[in-house]
């Protein structure tokens, strides 16, 4: 599966646009990372506990988006983006989305 933030894939033509695909994950901090991360906010700097939670959420959202694209018959996703929304303190939705397409050689 080719995934790009660009609107095309160099060397290929778009044979069909199959629509928007997405992967969504809603994550909260576990008590350990929340506690340690909370303590680190007092001192400032990078908070690796929260960084891991964010990275894991993005990876899961990305994989779900790719699976959605495969279900609709795509072999590529163009214009891929991430979005995140905090529902409440410590609870965040991460969305990976893009346009599913079928690429063909020119």
Image (spheres, helix red, strand yellow):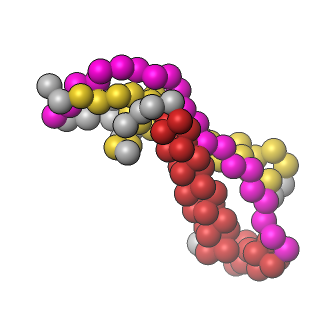
42 w.r.t. 59: above or below: below
Classify residue 90 as left or right of residue 13: right
Q: Quadrant of the N terminus?
A: top left
Viewer-proximal residue among 90 and 27: 27
Classify residue 2 as left or right of residue 56: left
Image-quadrant location for residue 10: top left
Classify residue 97 as left or right of residue 50: left
Which residue: 83% across, 54% down?
Answer: 89
Which residue: 34% across, 43% down?
Answer: 2
Image-quadrant location for residue 40: bottom right
Write down the region rendered in magenta. Answer: 11-31
Viewer-proximal residue among 68 and 38: 68
Q: Quadrant of the C terminus?
A: top left
Predominant secondary structure, magenta span: strand
105 w.r.t. 45: above or below: above
Image-quadrant location for residue 43: bottom right
């Amino acid at each position: 599966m080719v995934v790009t933030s660009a609107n095309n894939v160099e060397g290929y033509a778009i044979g069909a646009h199959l629509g928007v695909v997405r992967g969504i994950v809603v994550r909260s901090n576990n008590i350990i990372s929340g506690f340690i991360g909370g303590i680190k906010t007092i001192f400032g700097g990078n908070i690796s506990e929260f960084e891991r939670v964010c990275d894991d959420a993005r990876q899961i959202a990305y994989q779900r988006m790719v699976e959605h694209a495969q279900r609709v018959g795509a072999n590529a996703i163009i214009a891929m983006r991430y979005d995140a929304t905090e529902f409440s303190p410590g609870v965040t939705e991460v969305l990976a989305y893009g346009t599913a397409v079928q690429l063909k050689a020119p």
